[in-house]
Amino acid sequence: MRSLSMSILALAVALLAVSGGVVAADEKGHDHHAAAYEKCAAACSDCQRACDACSTHCAKLVADGKKEHLKTLQTCQDCATHCSAAASIVARKGPFSDLICKACAEACKRCGEECEKHKADPMMKKCAEECRKCEKACRDMLKHADSK
């Protein structure tokens, strides 16, 4: 019975190592991969909220007759959806973190570019800033995902 328990334990450790569950820490015990994932998940969550708020703002502007905000309304909605998915997947260090972060970084890039066209508007400016932060955090996290 004891040898069976030891075999199961050895198998579990091997599976954990193969799946990337063992993350190297530096000499001070810092887990840089986990920190990058946490920073990315937080940036994605912040960006999702900013984009949701901005899309509501844009909807009001469109309702007021400013049709040029229809594109920012749509980009903010799509970006918020990407960011929400990325925050969830990256927070749990899911195996598709790299896929969603590539898409999220591109969505944030595009959304930021659209919102920057209206940077005189404080809400649009804030959204663009959050998109830039999220894009950077996703690209930084990808460096860690590739080295896992």
Image (cartoon, grey):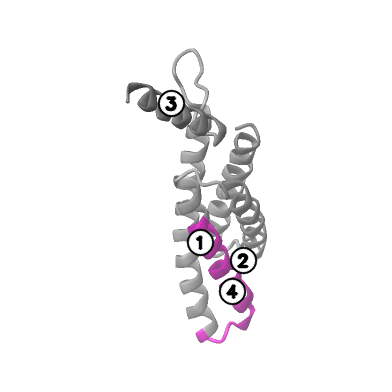
Residue indicated by mark 2? 118
- Asked whether the beta carbons under mark 4 and mark 3 sit within 8 Å of each other, the answer is no
Q: Secondary structure at mark 1?
A: helix
Q: Secondary structure at mark 2?
A: loop
Earlier in the chain: of badge 4 and badge 3, it is 3
Residue positioned most to the top = 27
Q: Position of residue 6 (x, y in %)?
A: 39, 23
Distance CA(mark 1)–CA(mark 3): 61 Å
Residue indicated by mark 1? 122
Residue positioned most to the left = 1
Q: Is residue 64 magenta?
A: yes
Q: With 134 as the anchor, is 12 left or right in this view?
A: left
Residue indicated by mark 4? 74
Residue indicated by mark 3? 7
Q: Position of residue 135 (x, y in %)?
A: 61, 49
Residue range highlighted in magenta: 63-85
Residue flagged by tag 2: what amino acid is it?
A: His
> For the residues carrying marks 4 and 2, which lies nearer the camera in this image?
4
